[in-house]
Image (spheres, grey):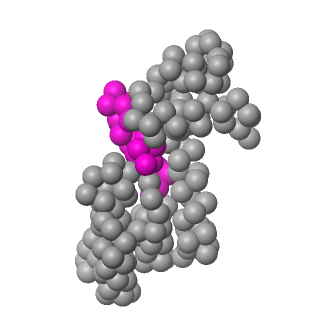
Amino acid sequence: MVNETHARILLAAREMLSADGTVSLDSVARQVGLTKPGLMHHFPSKEAMMVALVDAVIDQWEEQLTETLGAEPAEVGAVDRIGAYARFVLSQDFDRSDVVVFADPRLHRTLVARWEERMTPWWSVPEDATETMRTRLLAVRLLADGAWFASATGMLVPGPEERRRLRLLVEELLAGAR
């Protein structure tokens, strides 16, 4: 269970990322009214804080993804899981804090490893999947990843009509993957 101070620290770090701010132990400590040693009582390093921030973002995503899917990811097949991911992404707006995995180049490998570990249950495709199924599911995931990245960075964001057409394309790709 996350204590109140822990949650305040992560919220402050996420807000700083959303505002295109720099996240450091010092800047987050100032934001929440702690000393750097006080913050380090909760997160002994920037790496620990950033991994916890990745977890906080994915916790929120998983809640929404599970709601979109209507089940836990282990209870359904790859087509349904990856479809839920694409539908979720194409129906949401994101900000810079949703791309926390890219927030610190020095921690890139650690943050990417954590992101992959947490998101693999949503993205994995069975080993025995046909080549057509694999290709279509990869196309859907990459389409969704691109929409997520565009929204989170504010770069070439698809408008409502484009999102609608992308959702139709996702459904076509998924139908061919079944």
Residue found 47% across the figure and 63% down from its top: 92
Residue found 44% across the figure and 54% down from its top: 94
Residue found 52% across the figure and 37% down from its top: 15
Q: Viewed as shown, does residue 34 lie left or right of 105?
A: right
Q: Viewed as shown, does residue 31 lie left or right of 145?
A: right
Q: Is residue 1 visible in the rendered structure shown here?
A: yes
Q: Viewed as shown, does residue 52 lie left or right of 95?
A: right
In the rendered view, tell whether residue 120 sits above or below residue 31. below
Residue 124 percent coordinates (x, y): 41, 64
Residue 38 percent coordinates (x, y): 65, 15
Q: Quadrant of residue 65?
A: bottom right
Q: Nearer the viewer, residue 106 or 148?
A: 148
Q: Nearer the viewer, residue 130 or 149?
A: 149
Residue found 43% across the figure and 49% down from its top: 95
The answer to whether residue 74 is magenta is no
Q: Nearer the viewer, residue 40 or 21?
A: 21
The answer to whether residue 102 is magenta is yes
Magenta range? 95-120
Q: Viewed as shown, does residue 52 lie left or right of 94?
A: right
Q: Quadrant of residue 136?
A: bottom left
In the rendered view, tell whether residue 81 sits above or below residue 13. below
In the rendered view, tell whether residue 6 sits above or below residue 134. above
- Quarter of the picture containing the N terminus is top right
Residue 104 percent coordinates (x, y): 37, 31
- Quarter of the picture containing the C terminus is bottom left
Main SS type for the magenta part? helix
